[in-house]
Amino acid sequence: LVCHSNFGIPRRQTTGTDFNRVNLLMAVLEKRLGVQLSGCDAYVNLTGGMKIAEPAIDLAIVLAILSSFKNVALSPKMIAFGEVGLSGEVRSVSMAAQRVAEAAKLGFDTCILPKVCLKNIKETAGLKLIGVDNIQDVMDAIVRDVPPPQGDPDAPLKCLIFDSVYNSYLGVVVYIRVMDGTLRAGDNIRLMSTGAEFETVEVGVLDPFGLR
């Protein structure tokens, strides 16, 4: 969980993993991807009371932090492992083939892992392997290859507004998550909380590095 801090010094808390490692990963994200995390509280928790100290968890923590910071849900069928270095590189980890085999047994359909590990792993039916060299590659792979959680594009439009900003050129820009239906420029939308109606002038896509 990542949120903007109300205090001068952001609060960081971890349960089940190394506190200093999480701080290091957040510093790498800020330096290498330009993600402004210095003013954010961050809470990292491993469910079920597990404790994991190995570096292979780095990539999963990075994705969880970015997902919470951007308010963008990742596919629940995706798994990731790999050590992240200070320059943002994704390093090899031990027993990569065994990790991939276990992920396939558990029903995951996408695995993001260090590219250097791919040469030792056989193709697994039903599991797409995405090799990455650095965290920039990870972000590109998510936008390009990992499908978002699916809704029904033919159902009535249903969206969740999670943020909005005022742009001096565009006016009010609203960030939404489309749950069902399809939104196009020219469509009229209604806010359920107030009943107010507005026309959609322009539609863009929010990726990890901004609006396009």
Image: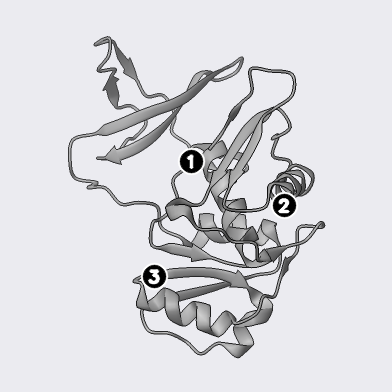
Q: Left or right: where does residue 170 sit relative to residue 179?
A: right
Corner quadrant of residue 170: top right
* Structural crowding at the residue carrying mark 3, measured as other residues with C-alpha within 10 Å and reported as few (<14), some (14–19) or many (≥20): some
Colouring style = one colour
Q: Nearer the viewer, residue 198 or 53?
A: 53
Quadrant of res 127: bottom left
**Residue matched to label 1:** 205
What whole-number distance in Å separates the C-alpha atoms at marks 3 and 1? 24 Å
Residue type, mark 1 in image = Val
**Residue 169 location, x and y as percent?**
60, 18
* SS at badge 2: helix
Residue 37 vs 64, above or below: the answer is above
Q: Earlier in the sequence, mark 3 or mark 1?
A: 3
The spot of residue 35 in percent (x, y) is 69, 39
Q: Secondary structure at mark 3?
A: loop
Q: Nearer the viewer, mark 2 or mark 3?
A: 2
Q: Which mark is residue 21?
A: 2
Residue 208 is at least partly visible in this image = no
Tell me which label, 2 or 3, sits earlier in the chain.
2
Q: Amino acid at mark 2?
A: Arg
Write down the residue under mark 3. 109
* Relative side of 197 to 76, left or right: left
Q: Residue at x 45, y 82 (%)?
A: 101
Q: Position of residue 80 (x, y in %)?
A: 54, 64
Closer-to-camera residue (209/149): 149
Label 1: which secondary element: loop
Q: Residue 164 versus residue 87: which sits nearer the camera?
A: 87
* Residue at image point 34% right, 71% down: 107
Q: Which kind of residue does numbered mark 3 sit on? A: Asp
Q: Which of pointers 1 and 2 indicates the residue nearer the eye?
A: 2
